[in-house]
Amino acid sequence: MARYLGRRLLQAIPVFFGATLLIYFMVFSLPGDPVLALGGDKGVSDALAAQLRSKYNLDKPFLVQYVLYLKGIFTGNFGVTFSGRPVGELLAHAYPITFKLAIMALVFEGVFGIGAGLLAGLRKGKVFDSTLLVVSLVVIAVPTFVIGFVLQFFVGVKWHLLPVSVGSDVSFRTLLMPAIVLGAVSFAYVLRLTRTSVFENLTADFVRTATAKGLSRPRVVMVHVLRNSLIPVVTFLGSDLGSLMGGAIVTEGIFNISGVGGTLYQAIRQGSAPTIVSFTTILVIVFIAANLIVDLLYAALDPRIRYA
């Protein structure tokens, strides 16, 4: 297991450097001069422009800028925005909120998606299965902001079950409805993926062998069918964590959440390259960490991978 994990860590190193280099190149290759844009219609004097370019290392060659940026990351210095605020403060404020929201959405889609998919796979072709398929298709087809507004109206305004917006009160109760909205589409995909995988494994040879040995139906389903059916689902959930964090712009906007999505949106509008690069770099790290966890879960779910 240690050797297996070591290989995965070695593979993650070039992925990190390659992704951060590409992000840095794309952001700093955007047209326009961010220094001159700071002055708006009034413009910026040549002396001030030169001072700002020196401060943000914009007067140095691209590779030198990238190396200095990596040095700052490894020392915990993410730089400052063009407005003078440390990017680390923005990260410390926004990421815990969005990470908590994404984890809640991941738990929602994982628990309910796998549970509903398992029941649908065991009852393929029946009314329960057909109903879940229709519901999941509707959830996939309806835009996220529509689901958010509908839940806000009924759950928050009409029934008064949960708060309509989050604001400064970031708690489990206030984040519950945004987490459901954020994870709704992924929940539908997990449901359908689990259903298909469970149905295929029900006819596998190892399931017939386990049944012939006299194992009880619950043990066959939970130990043999579900365990082997979770491999593709774990792949999806692992990659979805980063997608949830990076794609929370709409959900955070609907529920007034000051997280990663809203901060990135404002940074893009203002052309704040240090903020954009730092936030996306953390997302890259989240993706890499999630994939490492998925690899470990592979080894736990399928011993053939571990022993290989």
Image (cartoon, helix red, strand yellow):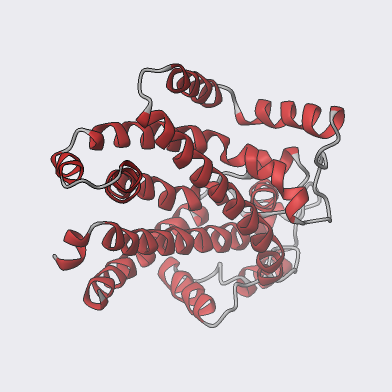
Displayed quadrant of residue 100? bottom right
Which percent across, then down, holds residue 106?
Answer: 53, 49
Q: How many marks?
A: 0
Image-based side of 264 in relation to 302, left or right: right
Q: Residue furthest bottom?
A: 75
Which percent across, then down, holds residue 216?
Answer: 29, 45
Is residue 16 something that shows in the picture? yes
Residue 291, above or below 69? above
Which residue is located at x 57 percent, y 35 percent? Answer: 184
Which percent across, then down, holds residue 260?
Answer: 64, 54
Which percent across, then down, holds residue 75?
Answer: 54, 83
Which residue is located at x 47 percent, y 74 percent? Answer: 70
Which residue is located at x 70 percent, y 64 percent? Answer: 90
Along the line of sight, the residue nearer the viewer: 67 or 181: 181
Image-based side of 292 in relation to 255, left or right: left
Along the line of sight, the residue nearer the viewer: 120 or 147: 120
Image-based side of 89 in relation to 140, left or right: right
Along the line of sight, the residue nearer the viewer: 220 or 21: 220
Q: Quadrant of the N terminus?
A: bottom left
Residue 287, above or below 254? below
Q: Residue furthest front?
A: 214
Along the line of sight, the residue nearer the viewer: 132 or 35: 132
Q: Quadrant of the C terminus?
A: bottom left
Residue 245, above or below 156? below
Which residue is located at x 60 percent, y 78 percent? Answer: 77
Is residue 31 something that shows in the picture? no
Image-based side of 166 in relation to 116, left or right: right
